[in-house]
Image (cartoon, grey):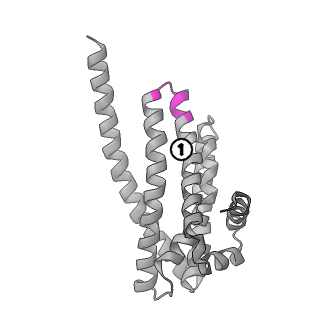
């Protein structure tokens, strides 16, 4: 795996290069590289979450955000790809296999790397939101190319998949948030003795 070539593909994917998505869809040797893109983007994005926690002087939450953001980035990638595959092929009769969607959506996640800037006061959250929207738009192009159907069906497929991933993420965030609050309270209780 050539890192420079991978970054070049990430840039082309972020620029919504239809030819890139066609190449990635057809090249089964890019399965591992697409996963590496997701991992790299998740790590870069988690640094922004970590720095936000550090600036808030909450090192425990910062470390938890660092780990959870990476894990959820990869988990959400797989969930979104398989849900999109199911919705796109069963509901809208697109033609693709799950591997094709894993590859194209892996590259489409590239713009999420801008979330590294989410720690910047005032503009950071806006940058993170823009990066998420950009990744969704790239996802629409990727899904359209992989499933070989029109943009309307691609938009609907991506929205359904995204909503399902969003709900799962909220549930996980609630569970982790409650767990982190419990650990914080326990630490305060033990530290007060």
The one of 7 and 72 positioned closer to us in this rendering? 7
Q: Provide residue 173's location: percent of width, then percent of height.
A: 37, 47
Residue 101: in magenta span? no
Give the prevailing secondary structure in the magenta stretch: helix
Q: Residue at x 51, y 27 (%)?
A: 56
The one of 99 and 77 positioned closer to us in this rendering? 99
Query: Which residue position holds label 1?
Result: 46
Q: Is residue 76 left or right of residue 117?
A: left
Q: Provide residue 81's location: percent of width, then percent of height.
A: 47, 70
User: Could you tell me which quadrant the C terminus lies in?
Assistant: top left
Residue 53: in magenta span? yes
Q: Residue at x 61, y 44 (%)?
A: 116
Q: Residue at x 44, y 84 (%)?
A: 89
Which residues fall within the magenta stretch?
51-59
Taking 137 as reference, is 127 above or below it? above
Question: Which quadrant would residue 83 be assigned to in this image?
Answer: bottom left
Q: Provide residue 179's location: percent of width, then percent of height.
A: 30, 38
Question: Which quadrant would residue 9 be assigned to in this image?
Answer: bottom right
Q: Provide residue 163's location: percent of width, then percent of height.
A: 42, 64
How many numbered discs?
1
Q: Residue at x 40, y 85 (%)?
A: 90
């Amino acid at each position: 795996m050539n890192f420079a070539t991978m970054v070049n593909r990430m840039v082309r994917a972020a620029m919504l290069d239809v030819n890139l998505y066609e190449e990635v869809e057809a090249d089964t040797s890019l399965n591992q590289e697409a996963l590496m893109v997701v991992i790299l983007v998740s790590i870069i994005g988690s640094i922004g979450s970590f720095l936000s926690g550090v600036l808030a002087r909450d090192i425990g939450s910062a470390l938890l955000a660092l780990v959870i953001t990476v894990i959820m980035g990869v988990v959400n990638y797989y969930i979104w790809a398989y849900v999109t595959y199911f919705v796109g092929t069963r509901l809208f009769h697109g033609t693709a296999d799950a591997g094709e969607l894993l590859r194209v959506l892996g590259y489409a996640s590239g713009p999420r790397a801008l979330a590294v800037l989410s720690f910047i006061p005032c503009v950071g959250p806006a940058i993170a939101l823009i990066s998420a929207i950009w990744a969704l738009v790239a996802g629409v192009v990727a899904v359209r190319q992989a499933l070989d159907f029109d943009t309307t069906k691609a938009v609907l497929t991506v929205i359904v998949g995204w909503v399902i991933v969003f709900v799962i993420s909220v549930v996980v965030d609630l569970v982790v948030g409650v767990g982190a609050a419990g650990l914080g309270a326990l630490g305060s209780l033990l530290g007060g003795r």
